[in-house]
Image (cartoon, helix red, strand yellow):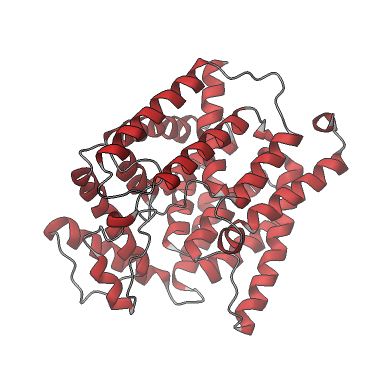
Amino acid sequence: MINDIKSPDKNSIIYIILILIYFFDQIFQTYVSRVFGITVFIFLSYIFFRENSFKLNKYYFTFIVFFTLYNTLSFTLNFDKCTDYQRIIQSIVFLYLIIYFVLKTNFSFLNNNNFLRLFSIILFLYIIFDFILIKSDLDFKIFYEPSHIALYLSPFLLLSLKKKILTIINIINLIYLLYFHLSLTFLVILILYILLTNSKKNLIFLLPILLIFLFFNYDGPIIVKFINSIKILNNFLNYGIIDLNIPYTMSIAVWLNGFSNIFIYLNQTYLLGTGFNLMGCEEYFYNGSFNYLFLDFGKHDVYNANDGSFNLSKIISENGLLGFIILYLVMRVIKNEFFNKSNDLFFIGSIIMFTFLFVRGLNYFSIPFVLTVIMVIKNNLKNNKN
């Protein structure tokens, strides 16, 4: 059987294909389908790394029944605001299929040294390509924005550095990303990583590099954006308003809108949420107390209406009070990994999951989000079972 092939050469080819799919996920989302990348990635992983001994248990089927009934109730009660039944049915069915294949696949290859080595080399080739694009002013991007670069690339970059895989190449990769694509999202990930590892090497090596690039950056000192963001949030928390005389970024504008949506959606949906993957559907699209901020950037549309900017906003807006239960359960796992660090992969996955929840998110069916859930949730369940 094909999944029994253990040849390093065969696995290397598989790794390269999976990594390339991972890198081009957002290109596929734009030009093919929003679920094409994750579908191919999960299906190939299942074919080559299937766990034949794993059997689905009653909890999987209990979850399907409960989640289906809950979403049926929330969708029915809010049918006057969103009638897109095809969207919720397709999303839920696809979710169940993804869970099925994920549970029956061994994703330990994500922590494999050969996989990380190949990822590091492809990342190095990407930064060469990206540098050419920047200098030639070509209007083409593999990733939508700098925060997405952080969410896609930082997990395996940090994991490779921590495991001392192709260290020189990965230092170059890190320095390039810090200089050309440092974002507040990347900043949060690196600060969490440095603080939580309790490593003298990180304090001596990573922290000084990060501080340098806070001031020395291709688009200007990001420290200015960071300070302005703190001022804006302080203003927002203290007075409930934004001082428009203080410069701010699109990232802060969409984050504030996502934060306000949590309370708006709870109020609109009888505390039940809209239903799975229905944020921004029809009448919900113009929700948000800070849509006017986009006008200051010359934008005449609402941004991140479907994902809430950060995933906590989306989870609660779509699941209501159930979203708080999900948050509690996930945060217990994250807290455990932050302080116990049972595994490098799980630990870095927990940092990324925290970032997804509170800083900057991606849609449910993006490859990094699904892989992060796998790193954090599936492996924690497996550890508890063992």
User: Residue 32: x and y, percent?
Assistant: 61, 59
Q: Residue shown at 14%/57% (left/top)?
A: 238
54 left or right of 368 in image = right
The quadrant in which the C terminus is found is top right
Which residue is situated farthest in the left direction here? 239
Q: Nearer the viewer, residue 203 or 88?
A: 88
Relative to the observer, which residue lies in front, 342 or 107? 107
For the question of whether residue 354 can be seen, the reply is no
The total of numbered circles placed on residues is: 0
Is 235 or 36 nearer to us in this picture?
A: 36
The image position of residue 87, as x and y in percent, is 44, 47
As drawn, is 352 to the left or to the right of 102?
left
The residue that appears at 29% across and 68% down in the rendered structure is: 228
Quarter of the figure with the N terminus:
top right
Residue 119 position, x and y percent, is: 70, 52
In this view, the residue in front, 218 or 285, is 285
Q: Is 58 drawn above or below residue 32 in the view shown?
A: above
Image coordinates of residue 131 in percent, x first then y, are: 64, 75
Residue sitting at x 47%, y 38%: 92
Q: Is residue 154 visible?
A: yes
Classify residue 231 as left or right of residue 113.
Answer: left
Above or below, 32 against 222 in this view is: above
Which quadrant of the view contains residue 291? bottom left
Please tell me in which quadrant of the rendered image residue 254 appears. Answer: bottom left
